[in-house]
Structures are given as structure tokens and as C-alpha cells.
Amino acid sequence: METSFFTKESCDYAGCYCEENVYKLCEKFIKSQKSSEQEKGYAVFLTNPQKQTYILYQQIGNPLNNNLVIWDYHVIFITKAKTSSFVYDLDSTLDFPIKFNEYYKKALGFSMKRRNRTFYRVCECEGFLKEFASDRSHMLIDKEKGIYNNPIPKWPCIGMKETMNLEKYLDLGVDERRFGKVMNEDEFYDFFMNS
């Protein structure tokens, strides 16, 4: 197994802010000086038109059903080299990192009645760091009182050019290259399954 870029304990984390957690992982990856043409980092958004993405082995999942969670969306970080890809999912109970094929098989590639197909927006690290912006307004439950449905991260809001563009990453119809590429389950698996 290749050396991990970072440990789970060394990562910035805020519950229910997976897109910002992965943004911080992308920053860490770029600063690690290990990123190169041979090793690329990706922010990956998992969602579907129904906003019901089934993922197993999630920390807040149902322990009676392999820690299943049905997220409206989820975001993970993946590194890809010539011979191997690794998933970094800060909300998972699986290893951190974990080989892509093992993560996919355990957390994503299961069959279940009425499970909606998942789509994946795959964004190269550098582009995601340049384009992503969030003012956290999607987490507000009372705008006047400034009350969020989960405590906000300790770091400042992300993005200088825009105040919010999360919806562009979640809209499967957005086909602008700067927001990454949407893949179906087979395309996603083939792209990262290289070992």
C-alpha cells in the first residue's frame, strides 16, 4: 500500500459540511508537495436527481444496516496514481484512506431494492480550489437569527469570486468544464479502478 498523504486526525472536519471538508483536503493535498503529474487529487460529489444517495459505512448511519445513510449529496476526496486510487471519506467508518476498489465495493457498489443510481461529479483538485464557493446559506434554518442546522466550521467561508455556487456542483445538468465532469456509476468505476 502506498503511503497516505495525511491521517484522519490531521484533517480539518466539520460535521455535515462534507464539501468544505473535502476543500480543506484538496488544500492539504496541494500543499503536501507530493501532488504531481503521476498523482492527482479529486473532489467527488455523489448525488442524483432524487437527492437520495445511498452510502454504507457512514458514521451516523444505521448500525443495524451496515451504517447506511441516505444523503441528499455527499463529497469525498480521491487520489489517483498510475497503479492505484485511494478514497478519503471523513464520514466513513472504513479505513482512511482506503483503496478505491474496496471502498466502492463496500460503500457504493451494493444492490438494494429501489436504490436510486448515483451520479458522480469528478473535479480535479486545482480547479475545485479555484472555483468552489460557499457562504453556507444552504445550512441556515433561521436567517434572521443566524441559526444553522449544524455548527459551522471553524474556518472562514470559502470563495472570493462568488458567495455560493454549491448548487452548480449538485445540478447534474450543469456541463461547464470548470465544475468538473459528471459520470454515471460505470464511468466513475472505470475512471478510478486502475489496480
Image (cartoon, rainbow, N blue to C red):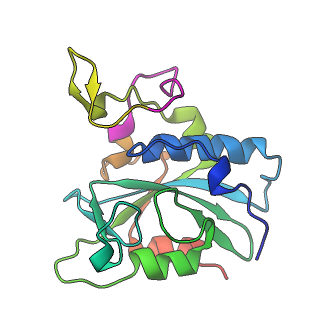
Q: Does 132 appear above or below 26?
A: above
Q: In this view, does 128 lie to the left or right of 91?
A: right
Which one is in front, 4 or 82?
4
Which one is in front, 140 or 41?
140
Within the image, what quadrant is residue 68 found in?
Answer: bottom left
Which one is in front, 108 or 15?
15
Kindly tell me whether residue 76 is visible in this rendering.
yes
Image coordinates of residue 105 in percent, x first then y, are 47, 82
Image coordinates of residue 77 in percent, x first then y, are 56, 56
Q: What residue span does the magenta drawing correspond to?
A: 153-167
Residue 138 lies in the magenta stretch: no
Residue at 39 percent across and 45 percent down: it is 169
Within the image, what quadrant is residue 184 found in?
Answer: bottom left
Principal secondary structure, stretch drawn in magenta = loop
Furthest residue toward front: 63
Residue at 34 percent across and 48 percent down: it is 170
Residue 163 lies in the magenta stretch: yes
Furthest residue toward right: 33
Kindly tell me whether residue 174 is visible in this rendering.
no
Image coordinates of residue 41 in percent, x first then y, are 65, 55
Image coordinates of residue 115 in percent, x first then y, are 22, 75
Q: Is residue 30 left or right of residue 145?
A: right
Within the image, what quadrant is residue 195 found in?
Answer: bottom right
Count of all numbered marks drawn on residues in the image: 0
Residue at 65 percent across and 79 percent down: it is 194
